[in-house]
Image: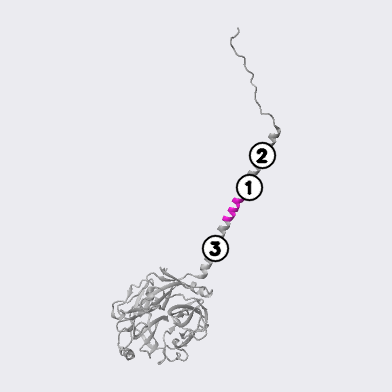
Amino acid sequence: MIKKNVKPKKKIIKKTKPKNKVGKVEYTKSKRIANKKIKIIKKSAKKIVKKIKVKKVARKKAKILSKKKKIVKEKKEISKLVRSSRNPILEPRLYPWESQAAFNPAAISIGGKVHLFYRALGEDGISRIGYASSYDGINFDERLTYPIYSIRSAEETKKHWPYTSPARPVYDTALYSSGGGWGGCEDPRAVCIDGYVYLTLNIFNGWNSLRVAVISINEKDLLNKKWLWKDFSYLSKEGDRQKNWVLFPEKINGKFAIFHNLDVGDPNKVLVSYVNKLDTSETPSGKDAPDPQCLPDHIVAWHKRTRSAACPPIKTKEGWLLLYHAMDKDDGNRYKLGAMLLDLKDPSVVLYRAKHPILEPDEWYENDWKPGIIYASGAVVKNGKLFVYYGAGDKYVGVASVILSDLVNSMKENTEVKLEKNKKINLE
């Protein structure tokens, strides 16, 4: 059967791209070039990434090296001297005998406590010795309401009153600028030798009488607060104006050693005398131990004017550490604290000296009454740390500390020791 109206199928012809050998070659070439460029870009990128990584590693190494150098530098520059944030730790109180000033303390550490013997000034202008103690060396929660030592006779002090103008037995800051006092026992220093505490004192009985004396007390009596002071005796001779002699805290070659002069014209030498008895029989005269006030100024280390020993020498493995007072060549009106290390066998020989002051009077309480005064008359060592107790501005007591070995090492390495302010002190 024949189908009607059926259209015949068209032949489907597949269209193909004309072969063009030249075009194919050009296409392949451009692809190769593109691939090559991609490879070059990837290679460059890898190099850049590698460089960045190298730089990062280099920076990291540089930081580590810098940190190590900083640590080494910090070790060389030592832990810095630190004032207590509780300063001043002692202030004048309302009791008449210490109403004007409490300053210039001696310090010892026995029986688990730090004991301070401080100079107290009252309304009568007479200096007496007050007492305070502390378990941690900072908080002096025990402080007696009465003096533990004063001059034997008020008549002795009255002898100097005619030298004042006008004559008056009162505290007067205008007529006498150094503490405002007119007599009594001043600026104690303390050492413990063979079970006894020895206290050296400046005995002031007028402009023509300023001498060094010594008293002693048994350690047990001190701990029990039985103030049985013995053997008052002058160390410096009558007629010689002397002050600030200090005892070494042990006998040397069986004798008491007295440090009495910082300045002998040779920066490598100091003057020490050795005596069998603590009296005037063997101590030097004014000829052999001249008054520091009469010595000429000259530059030694950082200072121009050398004043006096501060606290008694402290024994270390490297030598006797002696702190001292001096005045800067560019800052002549302020007491600053220096440090030197003396030979253990012959303490007249200076081994090392700090090239900068280790404490300067920059705080308000060091300038409140008499400006620019730091008078470091006491020090103790506790758990490897040196605690320095000082009179501030002739009115208060302050304390500052430093790791003892760091201070000694800094002097040996001749590096700078500076002050860090208002930090807490940890006694542990």
In the displayed structure, would residue 364 be above or below residue 276? above
The Cα–Cα distance between marks 1 and 2, rounded to whole angstroms, is: 20 Å
Amino acid marked by disc 2: Ser
User: Is residue 422 covered in magenta?
Assistant: no
Image coordinates for residue 427, horizontal then vertical, percent: 41, 69
Circle 3 sits in a helix, a strand or a loop, which is it? helix
Placement of the C terminus among the 4 image quadrants? bottom left
Do the CB atoms of the residues marked 3 and 2 lie less than 8 Å apart?
no
> Circle 3 sits on which residue?
66
Local packing at callout 2 (Cα closer than 10 Å; few below 14, some 14-19, many 20+) is few
Q: Which residue is mark 2?
A: 30
Dot 3 or dot 2: first in sequence order is: 2
Q: Please tell me how crowded label 3 is: few (under 14), some (14-19), or many (20+) other residues with Cα within 10 Å.
A: few
Residue 319 image position (x, y, % from top left): 50, 78
User: Residue 222's quadrant in the figure?
Assistant: bottom left
Closer to the camera, 288 or 343?
A: 288
